[in-house]
């Protein structure tokens, strides 16, 4: 478990929350309290006892109450819904002392200190800031998680299905966890950071693991050598607002969160609310994690049918566009490729940026060498011309570029080309055909 200081150093937008010191009500050792807010919950560690309290659903509007989980030294003791009155605190402390066979007075001090820290934190929520003297300097680490794609906040990537959005999101996750550039033009900022991948579409770890492995192979890395983890959270068809608390508590240990996808995490519409209410519920849940969030989304049906003319909006109400800090629209084009491979060019257009001018488009390509059976294949991202360019102006895929170079060096027929590149003769024949279709070489398929 990372400390609050380590997370603050790792995550640019983490607001420092100094651990409060609370005097115990007796002459015993003074409890030292460290508190961390986890969305709607609080985690409180009390030393030197080594106790940990997790307060969920804290209510201060009427009777003080919360759902409280208590542990010591990493060992769970109990969980209960309790009032936070003096009597309720005494009961929590006594039960914890009985179950841990510990010192009753020490547990009473720890419980009182933890509750007081919670109440103090609740009072400080929404404390006003004088904008005349508010800090103007950029926070440590800047304003981006991955420049320029992902700001410290929420970003939405929208395109119709089968575009490869999830694969791009996993590539960005590898970039953040490894602290290295995976997609040209998208640069991770700061030290490597762990990523929480919330999978609501096809949440099978096997397929996600294969994809991450292929991406890592594309940059010459073993996925086990990533500096930080990419952890999969299986949403299992549950809407985001139902699991927001669980995600927020996990997100505290991560530098970034990816939601795949927005539509799969929406609540079901019913008679009690409309589309705006449903979408607002989703974004309230996003806010609870207090972590930079990358959201994969789909357009509505009409836009998906003619995506070339669409403006990149998410399906649903305008709440989706209003609440995201940055939004990108993905377009793509598949280029001719040899059997067993694919080459797809992408352009990401910045359709919204809350805190500055829109970013220039990002253009890159994804070159797949498909694997079979236990082999996940290799996925390499390369620089490429935007998809608005004519096909004849598009750069060659790496396999075709290698074939053209070998052809220029004298391997002008299928057998010599196969020997030069170490590929089957039929594959060499296919590459020569593709080069001829581009008008880059002469001759016929019979040569």
Image (cartoon, rainbow, N blue to C red):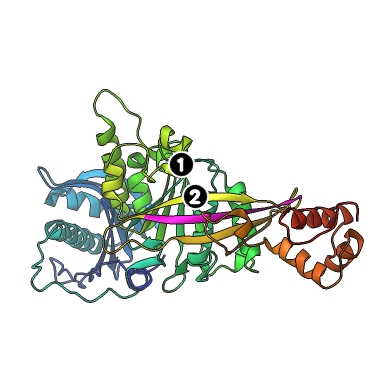
Determine whether the residue tagged by mark 1 lies in a helix, strand or loop: helix
Residue behind mark 1: 307
On the image, the x and y values in percent for residue 161 come to 51, 40
Would residue 33 be found to the left or right of residue 251 on screen?
Answer: left
The range drawn in magenta is: 339-350
Residue behind mark 2: 331
- Name the residue at 16% across, 49% down: 84
On the image, the x and y values in percent for residue 367 come to 64, 58
The question of residue 318 being in magenta is answered with no
Query: Which quarter of the image is occupied by the C terminus?
Result: bottom right
In the rendered image, the vertical position of residue 238 relative to residue 233, given as above or below: above
Front residue of 46/93: it is: 46
Q: Are marks 2 and 1 in contact (CB under 8 Å)?
A: yes
Front residue of 410/11: it is: 410
Would residue 433 be found to the left or right of residue 205 on screen?
Answer: right
Q: Quadrant of residue 294?
A: bottom left
On the image, the x and y values in percent for residue 34 come to 26, 67
In the rendered image, the vertical position of residue 215 relative to residue 273, given as above or below: below
In the rendered image, the vertical position of residue 106 relative to residue 5, given as above or below: above
- Name the residue at 26% across, 22% down: 271
Front residue of 101/179: it is: 179
Outermost residue on the top side: it is 271
Would residue 273 be found to the left or right of residue 426 on screen?
Answer: left
The question of residue 347 being in magenta is answered with yes
The prevailing secondary structure element of the residues shown in magenta is strand
Q: Quadrant of residue 126?
A: bottom left
- Graded by Cα atoms within 10 Å as few (under 14), some (14 to 19) or many (20 or more), the crowding at tag 2 reads many
Distance in Å between CA atoms under marks 2 and 1: 8 Å
On the image, the x and y values in percent for residue 235 come to 45, 42
* Viewer can see residue 253: no
- Graded by Cα atoms within 10 Å as few (under 14), some (14 to 19) or many (20 or more), the crowding at tag 1 reads some
């Amino acid at each position: 478990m990372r400390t609050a200081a380590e997370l603050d150093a790792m995550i640019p937008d983490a607001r420092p929350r100094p651990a409060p010191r609370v005097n115990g009500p007796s002459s015993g050792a003074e409890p030292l309290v460290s508190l961390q807010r986890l969305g709607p919950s609080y985690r409180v560690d009390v030393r030197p006892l080594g106790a940990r309290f997790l307060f969920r659903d804290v209510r201060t509007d009427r009777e003080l109450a919360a759902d409280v989980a208590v542990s010591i030294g990493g060992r769970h003791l109990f969980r209960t819904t309790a009032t936070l009155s003096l009597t309720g605190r005494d009961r929590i402390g006594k039960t914890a002392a009985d179950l841990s066979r510990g010192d009753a007075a020490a547990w009473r001090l720890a419980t009182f200190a933890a509750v007081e820290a919670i109440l103090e934190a609740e009072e400080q929520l929404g404390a006003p800031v004088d904008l005349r003297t508010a800090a103007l300097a950029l926070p440590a680490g800047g304003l981006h998680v991955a420049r320029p794609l992902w700001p410290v906040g929420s970003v939405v990537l929208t395109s119709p299905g089968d575009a490869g959005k999830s694969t791009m999101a996993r590539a960005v996750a590898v970039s953040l966890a490894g602290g290295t550039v995976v997609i040209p033009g998208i640069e991770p900022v700061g030290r490597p950071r762990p990523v929480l991948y919330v999978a609501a579409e096809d949440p099978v770890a096997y397929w996600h693991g294969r994809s991450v492995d292929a991406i890592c192979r594309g940059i010459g890395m073993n996925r086990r050598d990533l500096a930080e983890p990419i952890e999969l959270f299986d949403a299992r068809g549950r809407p985001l607002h139902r699991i927001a608390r669980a995600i927020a508590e996990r997100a505290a240990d991560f530098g970034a969160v990816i939601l795949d996808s927005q539509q799969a995490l929406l609540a079901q519409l019913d008679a009690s609310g409309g589309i705006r209410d449903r979408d607002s519920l989703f974004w309230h849940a996003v806010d609870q994690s207090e972590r930079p969030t990358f959201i994969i989304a789909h357009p509505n049906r009409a836009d998906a049918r003619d995506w070339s003319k669409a403006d990149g909006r998410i399906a649903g109400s305008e709440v989706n566009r209003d609440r995201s800090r940055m939004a990108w629209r993905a377009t793509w084009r598949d280029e001719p490729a040899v059997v067993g491979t694919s080459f797809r060019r992408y352009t990401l257009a910045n359709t919204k940026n809350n805190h500055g001018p829109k970013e220039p488009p990002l253009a890159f390509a994804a070159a797949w060498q498909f694997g079979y059976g236990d082999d996940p294949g290799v996925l390499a991202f390369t620089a490429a011309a935007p998809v608005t360019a004519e096909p004849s102006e598009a750069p060659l895929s790496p396999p075709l570029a290698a074939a053209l170079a070998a052809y220029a060096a004298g391997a002008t027929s299928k057998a010599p080309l196969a020997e030069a590149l170490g590929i089957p003769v039929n594959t060499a024949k296919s590459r020569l055909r593709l080069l001829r279709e581009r008008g880059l070489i002469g001759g016929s398929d019979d040569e």
